[in-house]
């Protein structure tokens, strides 16, 4: 073994030849094979892997769809109908792509919920969490622009309403909107650039996902108890334990996905989007896709245009500072009796926002959306900071092994690098 | 740091004061500023390429013949990809619009300032809230509480002068620039 080559431990001569020059196999073995992972994951820890699978499915189907799509206002709608009717398995590619977006958001919402319930955003995982919020924002931008591409009525008017959000900003608003459109209304230049960006952003997402995982592999995973692993008795290797556990979740994911694609492929869409875009007629009831409804409800809850826009962007911006809003040193809400109730109410409240966001802007939905919006912000800005100070948490277990193994896993073996027990 | 500024073994140039770091700071600042200007110059074409192109700008005017529009009716024409509402207003419409005190308006503007000929109102048919097309052009449409237009998206009401009277929209329907070429023909844009 000459100097400058990686000292590979692989026996296969071909793998060894590559690995000693570019230690990809060693890296994979370290990060996904023997990687020490808390032994007490529940199924909520499947959703990161499911999100990656979703991203790969979206990129794969998207690349093939783009081979038959025409990004021109005169042809876009018809090219999508051609994909549905004439292109071999075009219907499958499109339904997988359209419902895949919904699956991706379901998975990511559960993944975010997991992080919020078990305190995965807290030190030392703040940056990991913030990278996740960046991915979420990129996903929303990508999904929005993708929905414009079929150039149906909802595509056109969704694009008009969302781009007009920027007109709320004083002075520069109008110029920003003209710049976004490349014209004086949503038109061919807009469709072209949305297609370009819709193709680009998933690869940007993939890049940020790489950083997200790289940061995860520095701090290690959180776990349902929210306490750090203290030694080898608290961890198990990622493979085969969590590769197999993830596979179970993946099967359930594919079953749900298949039910959507093969039995109710249009359930989550809007019939209006099968009407070609018409800039002269607005559909009577414009709603965004289901995954944007909570934020749409917040936008409409405020009677002032700029105020609504700021609150809507603010509802997501708050996620960036969540690690600093929640001052409690206890991560898992299992040990936080009050926060747990507040967070479960927050969860219900999120569904209420999702529901009223899909309803017309009339009573009683307007009043409900105002109360829900108030609770959404109160949870982040009042309840969490306050409970971090006054809440008395339940006693934390001594170690993961003590808490989850039948006889506590024997005496605790402290790893050399283990930190002293956290005091809550 | 001053001693490091001069390469070892070379004498300081004659006639210069010993370097106190000011010269090095100046060079760093100047280089950084030069690079920033360079980056800006490179970025600008990319940003500008997304603004409306020459062919889009060239399609910026539309001519409309008003003769076929009977009193009380309205037509919608396309200008810059947007609908423009042209309403042939009745004397009652005009009177109602002019009787409204400015203090009742969200975006105060007199009716006179919004028309060139009393009976013809020309406005861009795009709600100033989030860009939907308000209803009220067809005789069968809902015209809202002020007999003007009603936006179905978020419930803004406009009066026969195209001024917002109720709802989330902050501004009146915009009046495009237009000229009467003859008594019954206008050019928008």
Image (cartoon, coloured by chain):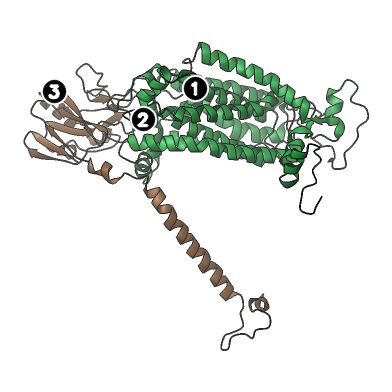
Chain colours: A green, B brown
Q: Position of residue A108 (x, y in %)?
A: 59, 27
Indicate whether B19 appears above or below A102. Answer: below
| Image quarter in which the N terminus of chain B is found | bottom right
Chain containing the residue with disc 1: A
Q: Which residue is mark 2?
A: B168
Q: Position of residue A300 (x, y in %)?
A: 43, 27
**CA separation in Å, label 1 and label 2:** 40 Å
**CA separation in Å, label 3 and label 2:** 27 Å
Say if residue A159 shows up in the picture: yes
Question: Residue reaching furthest top?
Answer: A263
| Residue under the image location 79 percent in, 54 percent down | A3
Question: Residue reaching furthest right?
Answer: A411
Q: Which residue is mark 1?
A: A93
Q: Position of residue A139 (x, y in %)?
A: 53, 33
Disc 1: CA contacts within 10 A as few (<14), some (14-19) or many (>=20): many
Q: Which residue is mark 3?
A: B72
């Amino acid at each position: 073994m000459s100097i400058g080559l990686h000292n590979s431990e692989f026996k296969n001569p071909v793998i060894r030849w590559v690995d000693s020059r570019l230690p990809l196999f060693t890296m994979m073995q370290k990060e996904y094979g023997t990687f020490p992972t808390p032994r007490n994951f529940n199924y909520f820890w499947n959703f990161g892997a499911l999100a990656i699978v979703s991203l790969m499915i979206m990129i794969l189907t998207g690349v093939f769809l783009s081979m038959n799509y025409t990004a021109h206002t005169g042809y876009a709608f018809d090219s999508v109908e051609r994909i549905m009717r004439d292109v071999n398995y075009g219907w499958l590619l499109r339904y997988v792509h359209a419902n895949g977006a919904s699956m991706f958001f379901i998975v990511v919402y559960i993944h975010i919920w997991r992080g919020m319930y078990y305190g995965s955003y807290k030190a030392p995982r703040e940056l990991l969490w913030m990278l996740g919020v960046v991915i979420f924002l990129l996903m929303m931008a990508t999904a929005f622009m993708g929905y414009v591409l079929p150039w149906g009525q909802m595509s056109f008017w969704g694009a008009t309403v969302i781009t007009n959000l920027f007109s709320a900003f004083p002075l520069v608003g109008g110029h920003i909107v003209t710049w976004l459109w490349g014209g004086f209304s949503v038109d061919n230049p807009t469709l072209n650039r949305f297609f370009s960006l819709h193709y680009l952003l998933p690869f940007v997402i993939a890049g940020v996902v790489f950083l997200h995982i790289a940061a995860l592999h520095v701090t290690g995973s959180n776990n349902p108890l929210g306490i750090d692993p203290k030694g080898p008795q608290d961890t198990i290797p990622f493979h085969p334990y969590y590769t197999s556990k993830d596979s179970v979740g993946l099967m359930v994911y594919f079953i749900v996905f298949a039910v959507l694609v093969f039995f109710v492929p249009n359930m989550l869409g809007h019939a209006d989007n099968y009407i070609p875009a018409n800039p002269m007629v607005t559909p009577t009831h414009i709603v965004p896709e289901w995954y944007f409804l909570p934020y749409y409800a917040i936008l409409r809850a405020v009677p002032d245009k700029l105020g609504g826009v700021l609150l809507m962007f603010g509802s997501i911006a708050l996620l960036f500072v969540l690690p600093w809003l929640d001052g409690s040193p206890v991560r898992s809400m299992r040990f936080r009796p009050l926060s747990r109730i507040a967070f479960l109410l927050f969860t219900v409240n999120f569904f209420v926002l999702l529901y009223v966001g899909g309803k017309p802007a009339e009573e009683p939905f307007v009043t409900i959306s105002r109360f829900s919006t108030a609770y959404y912000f109160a949870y982040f800005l009042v309840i969490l900071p306050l409970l971090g100070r006054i809440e008395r948490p339940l006693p934390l277990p001594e170690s993961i092994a003590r808490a989850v193994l039948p006889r506590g896993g024997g005496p605790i073996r402290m790893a050399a690098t283990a930190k002293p027990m956290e005091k809550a | 740091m001053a001693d490091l500024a001069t390469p070892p073994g070379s004498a300081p140039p004659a006639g210069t004061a010993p370097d106190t770091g000011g010269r090095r700071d100046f060079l760093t600042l100047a280089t950084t500023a030069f690079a920033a200007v360079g980056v800006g110059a490179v970025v600008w074409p990319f940003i500008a390429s997304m603004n409306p192109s020459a062919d889009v700008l060239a399609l910026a005017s539309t001519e409309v013949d008003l003769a076929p529009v009977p009193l009380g009716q309205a037509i919608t024409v396309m200008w810059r990809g947007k609908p423009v509402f042209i309403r042939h207003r009745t004397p009652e419409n005009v009177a109602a619009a002019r009787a409204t005190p400015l203090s009742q308006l969200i975006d105060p503007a007199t009716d006179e300032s919004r028309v060139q000929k009393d009976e013809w109102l020309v406005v861009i048919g795009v709600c100033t809230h989030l860009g939907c097309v308000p209803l009220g052009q067809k005789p069968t449409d809902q015209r809202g509480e002020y007999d003007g237009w009603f936006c179905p998206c978020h419930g803004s009401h406009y009066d026969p002068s195209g001024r917002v009277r109720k709802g989330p929209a902050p501004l009146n329907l915009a009046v495009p620039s237009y000229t009467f070429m003859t008594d019954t023909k206008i050019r928008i844009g």
